[in-house]
Amino acid sequence: MTNKNREEAKNYVLKMAKEHDVKFIRLWFTDILGMLKSFAITVEELEKALEEGMGFDGSSIEGFARIDESDMIALPDPDTFRLLPWRPREHRAVARMFCDIMRPEGDPFEGDPRYVLKKNLKRAADMGYTYYVGPELEYFYFKDSNGTELLDQGGYFDLTPLDIASDLRRETVLTLEEMGIDVEYSHHEVSPSQHEIDIRYTDALTMADNVMTYRLVVKQIALSHGVYATFMPKPVFGINGSGMHVHQSLFKGGRNAFFDANDEASLSTLAKQYIAGLLKHAPEITAINNQWINSYKRLVPGYEAPVYLSWARRNRSDLIRVPGYKPGQENATRIEFRSPDPACNPYLVFSAMLAAGLEGIEKGYETREPIEENVYEMSAEEREKRNIGTLPSSLSDAIHLMENSELVRKTLGDHVFNAFIQDKKVECDLNRVQITEYELKRYLPIL
């Protein structure tokens, strides 16, 4: 953003705050795990915050800073100013803005996930591309946060009469649209009490901010109705977990660089190179896409979650799917990457996918033939014969692959790369020594 544009945006924010009688502004940012952090300022501090940022102690934020270098500045992005619809509107309304985290000297803080994404988007821009994404985030509604008591027994696209979730989704969609987030679809998902609201595609930075807002809104609306919403990847054994399928494309100017009318699948050579980059580097970015121990309870065969490194035009068992092309809708040509889950850090996930795809473009990777058969029904011998690899099956394995990846280190930068790996190794160690309910039921009666 140029100084002139920022000045105009700043004046617009000050005007909107006055018109809507805003008293408090919440400044939002995320830690390296994608947990939303916030502190509030009063409207009297707004102009100063927009010009200079607001200081805070970064030493207590996961992956940010050591105690001896804890001073940080949260600089609000005026383009992200929105009123919070669930807060009172009259006399002391509340708004929010996402922040870029800066060092006191004025340099961007390399541990800020939003900065990591901006850095990778600049790489794409330098190549002439704008990166668009459209994620589909699935989630569950439960009676409360203490268990997994379902609210319904519905299935995919079901309309369940007198189902509280229909009203929850409706209110969530209306709230998102009040905050300037366009919604394409909302529907019941495959599993009981599982739902999905799809956000209309936009540029990756705006979308990462939107994902953070979306997750909060879903939870906030659920809480206001006395129920609990969770983006935990696999909360219930024996049914599908929750994914975050990410539709993505590169545009050059106003043209979709993934589209080629002369190709059988309507995919350009560049799109196929992008797919090849994603397939080649998918294992080493899995720890970012699926960052929790629980994530790998979802990534198992039989529950619609992708496990194998393959792509197809229509097949939903593959890691990458190419949605069908409709004549006259060239801009809708895209690829769908299906392994991430909704409990990820979207800033890092979009960065990792983009970096893998750009690597394929820059190095001219060749794409293997699409696998239109059901990969899950193939024998291990057939998959090996067709050179179909697999994603890592545990967080520990995923971290090992990430740790040895130059691509991921370059994508995240040393600070986030090292802090993320350190945090996840601690999580693996803590999990390793736990005694689970399964172990007690399985072994205690017989050993």
Image (cartoon, grey):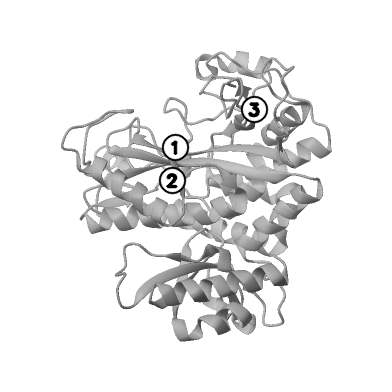
Q: Which residue is mark 2?
A: 294
Q: Are marks 2 and 1 in contact (CB under 8 Å)?
A: yes
Q: Are marks 3 and 2 in contact (CB under 8 Å)?
A: no
Amino acid residing under circle 2: Asn
User: Considering only vertical position in the picture, is 83 above or below 447?
Assistant: below
Q: Closer to the camera: disc 3 or disc 2?
A: 3
**Residue 337: x, y in percent?**
58, 34
Q: Which one is nearer the viewer's eye here, 188 or 243?
A: 188
Q: Which residue is mark 3?
A: 330
Q: Which one is nearer the viewer's eye here, 293 or 354?
A: 354
Q: Are marks 3 and 1 in contact (CB under 8 Å)?
A: no
**Residue 28: x, y in percent?**
49, 68
Does residue 253 appear in this view?
A: yes
Q: Which residue is mark 1?
A: 298
Residue 152 as seen in the image, left or right of residue 100:
left
SS at mark 1 in the image: helix
Residue 388: quadrant of the picture:
top right
Q: Residue at x 32, y 58 (%)?
A: 220
User: Considering only vertical position in the picture, is 262 above or below 240?
Assistant: above
Q: Residue at x 34, y 32 (%)?
A: 239
Amino acid residing under circle 1: Arg
Q: Residue at x 32, y 28 (%)?
A: 157
User: Considering only vertical position in the picture, is 40 above or below 32?
Assistant: below
Quadrant showing the N terminus: bottom right
